[in-house]
């Protein structure tokens, strides 16, 4: 086992940075580390809050006791079987959307090139809806359908834009068109389904954690855990890909790494969508906010993951408990994200 060394110093932009050498070689800014610690603390606070709130509100000591199987049996049930899987699912789904959005935006070279804008999320949703309505599959089957739907949709988008590569505004326009078509397919499937199946599919399409169970939560947790090592290994090459394939290869990045990371992004958004439904705009907004907070232009996968997790947790908490509305998380992310999309489009327009 090699030793890991930590050193401090300025980066190329004269900003304070930390350098790790050993098993993982990385240089991160001090500001990014501080932001990540703040985001992680916020996520832990949101998780603790979500475990305490519900039809039966609990105090901090009661939540802690219930986590260890002590105290009132009803408290133990609510905390461990209802609220904990929901909180973990929201965290993992948000992180998956955040990392996927960052990967897509870097690979496409477009701040609007996130999977929820270019139709990949909608394709994953179509695959999952087919499994829900036509196959009546379990959570693992729904996850498989979502992954296949995301891969097929990404392949269609690539074929439609291959003359220009997966970069530029043409990708966004084609993706939006394909996403709209798939949205119509989803509506057709739901309208033709039996009442119970249609209701389940429609609630899932909105994006919700209301019926979360451990079996559903494990789908996204296992997916993120399996893809985690590839994400860690690909963070540095992904940052290099921002400068083009020729430069990346010249700096030692394998030629096929762009395709590898694209597949990872598709898998992440697919398993996240299979778990919660297509939460609108999280994959687009999380990387934007992460870069704004850290004031960096690199891959920022860790910060994007934490930002996405915080956004989804906050949306789920706000929707479930604010003003007694009991709104699905997807309604909150859609409303806030739509306004943020307008802002991003205005910023992009000024750059043209």
Image: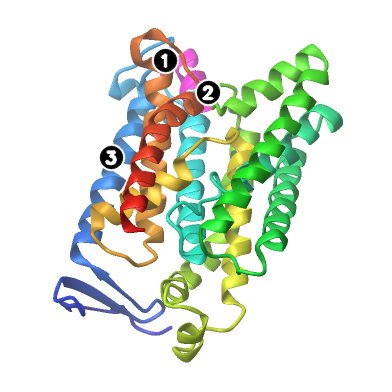
Name the residue beneath numbered marker 1.
54
Name the residue beneath numbered marker 3.
42
Horizontal side, residue 328 vs residue 19: left or right: right
Is-magenta flag for residue 139?
A: no
* Label 3 vs label 2, nearer the camera: 3
Are the residues tagged 2 and 1 within 8 Å (C-beta)?
yes
Graded by Cα atoms within 10 Å as few (under 14), some (14 to 19) or many (20 or more), the crowding at tag 1 reads some
Establish if 157 lies above or below 91: below
Calculate the distance from the C-alpha at mark 3 to the C-alpha at mark 2. Answer: 21 Å
Calculate the distance from the C-alpha at mark 2 to the C-alpha at mark 1. Answer: 10 Å
User: What is the quadrant of the C terminus in the image?
Assistant: bottom left
Name the residue beneath numbered marker 2.
82
Residues rendered magenta in the picture: 71-81
User: What is the quadrant of the N terminus in the image?
Assistant: bottom left
Graded by Cα atoms within 10 Å as few (under 14), some (14 to 19) or many (20 or more), the crowding at tag 3 reads some
Task: Return the residue nearer the eye: 345 or 9.
Answer: 345
Residue extending farthest right:
135
Q: Residue at x 56, y 29 (%)?
A: 207
Q: Where is residue 21 shown, x and y percent of the image?
A: 32, 81
Q: Where is residue 44 shown, x and y percent of the image?
A: 32, 39
Task: Return the residue nearer the eye: 73 or 5.
Answer: 5
Name the N-terminal-most of marks 2 and 1: 1
């Amino acid at each position: 086992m090699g030793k890991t060394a930590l050193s401090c110093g300025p980066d190329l932009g004269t900003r304070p940075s930390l350098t790790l050498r050993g098993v993982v070689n990385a240089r991160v800014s001090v500001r990014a580390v501080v932001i990540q610690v703040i985001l992680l603390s916020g996520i832990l606070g949101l998780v603790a809050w979500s475990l305490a709130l519900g039809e039966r509100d609990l105090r901090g000591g009661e939540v802690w006791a219930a986590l260890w199987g002590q105290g009132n049996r009803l408290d133990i049930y609510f905390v461990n079987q209802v609220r904990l899987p929901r909180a973990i699912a929201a965290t993992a789904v948000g992180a998956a959307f955040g990392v996927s959005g960052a990967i897509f935006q870097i690979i496409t070279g477009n701040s609007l090139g996130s999977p929820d804008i270019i139709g990949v999320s909608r394709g994953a949703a179509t695959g999952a809806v087919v499994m829900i309505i036509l196959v009546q599959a379990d959570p693992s089957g729904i996850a498989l359908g979502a992954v296949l739907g995301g891969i097929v949709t990404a392949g269609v988008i690539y074929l439609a834009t291959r003359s220009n590569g997966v970069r530029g505004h043409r990708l966004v326009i084609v993706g939006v068109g394909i996403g709209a078509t798939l949205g119509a397919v989803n509506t057709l499937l739901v309208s033709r389904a039996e009442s119970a199946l249609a209701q389940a599919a429609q609630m899932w399409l909105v994006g919700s954690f209301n019926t979360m169970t451990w079996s559903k939560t494990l789908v996204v947790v296992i997916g993120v855990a399996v893809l985690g090592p590839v994400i860690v290994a690909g963070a540095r090459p992904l940052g290099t890909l921002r400068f083009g394939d020729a430069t990346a290869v010249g700096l030692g990045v394998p030629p096929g790494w762009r395709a590898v990371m694209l597949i990872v992004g598709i898998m992440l958004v697919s398993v996240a969508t299979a778990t919660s439904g297509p939460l609108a705009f999280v994959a687009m907004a999380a990387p934007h906010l992460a870069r704004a907070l850290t004031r960096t232009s690199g891959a920022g996968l860790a910060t994007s993951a934490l930002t996405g997790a915080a956004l989804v947790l906050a949306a789920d908490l706000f929707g479930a408990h604010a003003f007694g509305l009991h709104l699905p998380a997807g309604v909150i992310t859609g409303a806030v994200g739509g306004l943020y999309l307008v802002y991003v489009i205005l910023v992009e327009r000024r750059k043209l």
